Image (spheres, grey):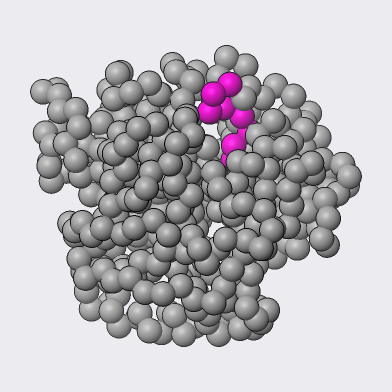
Amino acid sequence: MRSGSSTCAGALFMVLLLGTSHEAQPVGTERILTKPDLARPMFVGSPAGDDRLFIVERTGEILIYQNGSLLGTPFLSIQAVDTTSEGGLLGLAFPADYAASGFFYVYYTSAGLTSRVSRFQVSADPNVAGASSELNFFSLAQPFNNHNGGTLAIRSGFLYLGLGDGGSANDPGDRAQDNTNAFGQMIRWNISTGTPGSLQAYAYGLRNPFRFSFDRLNGDLYIGDVGQDAREEIDIQAGTDTSLLNYGWDVEEGTLCNDPDPSELPCESTSFANPMWEYDHSGVGCSGSVTGGVVYRGAIAEIYGHYFFADYCTDNIWSFEWDGDEVVSVEVTNRTSQFSPPAGTLDDIVAFGEDGFGEMYIVDNGGEVYRVVPEPQLGMLRAGIVALAWLASRRRRFARRGYGSRVAAVVFPVQRA
């Protein structure tokens, strides 16, 4: 998230060694919801196999979209949400056993900009959850009103939250390099027993991991870490990598030396995990702010396995495919023009989401939700065939070269569409 409203004329795109670009495939977007039905949508998601789409409104409501329309009654209404600056109801996650337990998790800021993670439970009506069912198990007072993070996600029985460094500029409290606090970290709780366990650190050295996601096929973690004045970055951690990685902020912004401190690691320290790629956005006002996305695992063969993300300020949308090799081969596609919808304006993008079957949605800050259109609609049988083919094509490469290694980045200019 960011402040300001200007855009930049172009961007320098940081692509990995051997990265190439190609033409966009024949897929696009269609708008499914807009104002006045929605106010400030921030995220969408669904339990696995569920045909409903749950829409998170920043003001504190979760709505349900089903069979082409919104249900009349909100799924959940939280009254004590503080929307000051970058606050609000920002994240939602459903565990694998949602159909049986009825539990789900939300992330929001309450009065005084206190970050909260709570568990709720659906009522006897499957389309309504009572606010009184809230079990709050994490609260953290924010020292500033920006860099709150915003995403919850679940992998292998753990609930993950990405938190910013506490805000302001250049992390004045040096919180992100201190892995004993929750600021500037990916943190998690074991929820496999139903009751959330104690907080665990999973990664640190982050500025504002506003949107992150796990690849639903292999558990790879993709983090869109919002930069400050110069660089936006995507960090990737393989699902098989359990290291406590340090992504370098605020010593480095991306791979750029930013604010070295004698009490911290030096710039270019080998202890820092480099971004998998990054792009430059130097300029006046809002010249760049990455919105991390998702790896597409739906039924569209042409984009299967590609990671999609956007920039809130420039409205660019890109995708690439990371194969997990130690020399990563990335095909970078600018899909901005391709995803320009026939109705509405897809800009100020705040989230990418998935429905219960792996199809992808894009949410913008203007009150609109778009669906990436399968062309043609081929159903789950095709998706399964595509998944098997994708895994088979990479099995030898993963086994031979070691999944999850990192390499340095190389800069190539890419003009905005």
Left or right of 409 in this view: 364: right
In the rendered image of this protein, does residue 292 appear above or below residue 24?
A: above
Picture coordinates of residue 315 (x, y %)? 48, 49
- Is 6 or 35 nearer to us in this picture? 6
Picture coordinates of residue 383 (x, y %)? 59, 78
Residue displayed at 11% across by 33% down: 266
One can see residue 30 in this view: yes
One can see residue 205 in this view: no
The C terminus: image quadrant:
bottom left
- In the rendered structure, does residue 85 fall within the stretch colored magenta? yes
Q: Give the range drawn in magenta.
A: 84-92
Residue displayed at 48% across by 60% down: 336
- In the rendered structure, does residue 352 fall within the stretch colored magenta? no
Image quadrant in which you'd find residue 402: bottom left
- Is 112 or 287 nearer to us in this picture? 287
In the rendered image of this protein, does residue 76 appear above or below residue 17?
A: above
Left or right of 331 in this view: 6: right
Residue displayed at 57% across by 73% down: 27
Left or right of 110 in this view: 398: left
Q: Total number of numbered labels? A: 0
- Is 103 or 393 nearer to us in this picture? 393
Picture coordinates of residue 306 (x, y %)? 44, 68
In the rendered image of this protein, does residue 54 appear above or below residue 249?
A: below
Residue displayed at 19% across by 27% down: 259
Left or right of 370 in this view: 228: left
Picture coordinates of residue 238 (x, y %)? 35, 59
Q: Residue most toward the front?
A: 9
